[in-house]
Image: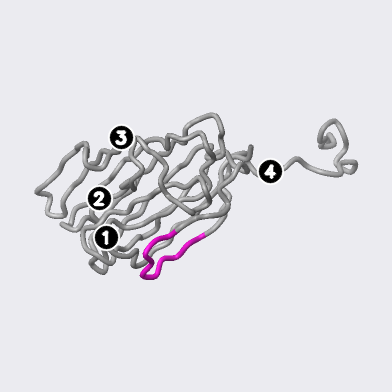
Amino acid sequence: MALIKHGNNALSSVTAFPSAVPTGKPVLLSTATASASSSIEFTSGIDSTYDIYKWEFINIHAATDNTQLQFNLSTDTGSTYSVTKTSTHFFSYHSEDDASTALGYSTSFDLAQSTGNQIITNGIGNGNDESASGEMYLFSPSSDTFVKHFIVRTNTYYASNWSIESFTAGYGNTTSAVNAIKFVMSSGNIDAGQIKLYGIGAN
């Protein structure tokens, strides 16, 4: 039987194997757990180490009925959250009673050169079983050449007992490095839930 080779060497001569970790595998950087929190901020870990940063929203529960989860970006490690943004937002929904369905564009949720918060869910119900989950990507936040693109997809247990899938995308119109992000509700606290931050694809 032929001897198994690695890099033209007998296995007995091999001193090291190449890494089996695939390029682009998400690396968990931090986890924030809400508990009647006015906001959740990530003020560290967003730098030039990774090309893409991803946040996962897991069962975000609102303290106030029919409120939206929002975010804003910072270029000064969270001292201020006022990056100018331009974005688009559309949604689809289906009611529990099968009476209502729709696919539509939300002009009230998009931004045009605004420093305000970006809405990323429809109105989350505050019933015990109501919440929102989803994911957000931020691309090359440390670039000093390009704007900062983001893509968000969420699903919400809407206050009127609908499932609403929301799609939000846009860019932070700055060539300064973005190094912090804050998540808040449009009204009241983030009652419960987790937000996880991952880095993807080392530079």
Check the image and report above or below for 184 versus 33: above
Q: CA distance from mark 1 to mark 2?
A: 13 Å
Dot 1 amino acid type = Ser
Q: CA distance from mark 4 to mark 1?
A: 46 Å
Q: Residues within 10 Å of mark 3 (few under 14, many from 20)?
A: few
Q: Is residue 138 left or right of residue 193?
A: right
Q: Earlier in the sequence, mark 2 or mark 4?
A: 4
Residues tagged 2 and 3 counted as in contact (Cβ below 8 A): no
Residues tagged 1 and 2 counted as in contact (Cβ below 8 A): no
The residue under the point 32% across, 65% down is 189
- Between residue 109 and residue 98, name the one nearer to us: 109
**Range of residues picked out in magenta:** 31-40
Nearer mark to the viewer, of 1 and 2 = 1
Q: Residues within 10 Å of mark 2 (few under 14, many from 20)?
A: many
The residue under the point 35% across, 54% down is 133
- Between residue 97 and residue 46, name the one nearer to us: 46
Query: In the drawing, what numbered circle is on residue 187?
Result: 1
Dot 1: what SS? loop
Q: Residue furthest left?
A: 99
Residue corresponding to mark 3: 112
Dot 3 amino acid type = Ala
Q: CA distance from mark 4 to mark 3?
A: 44 Å
Query: In the drawing, what numbered circle is on residue 20?
Result: 4
Give percent across and percent down for residue 176: 52, 37
Q: Earlier in the sequence, mark 4 or mark 3?
A: 4
Nearer mark to the viewer, of 4 and 1 = 1
Dot 3: what SS? loop
Dot 4 amino acid type = Ala
Residue corresponding to mark 2: 122
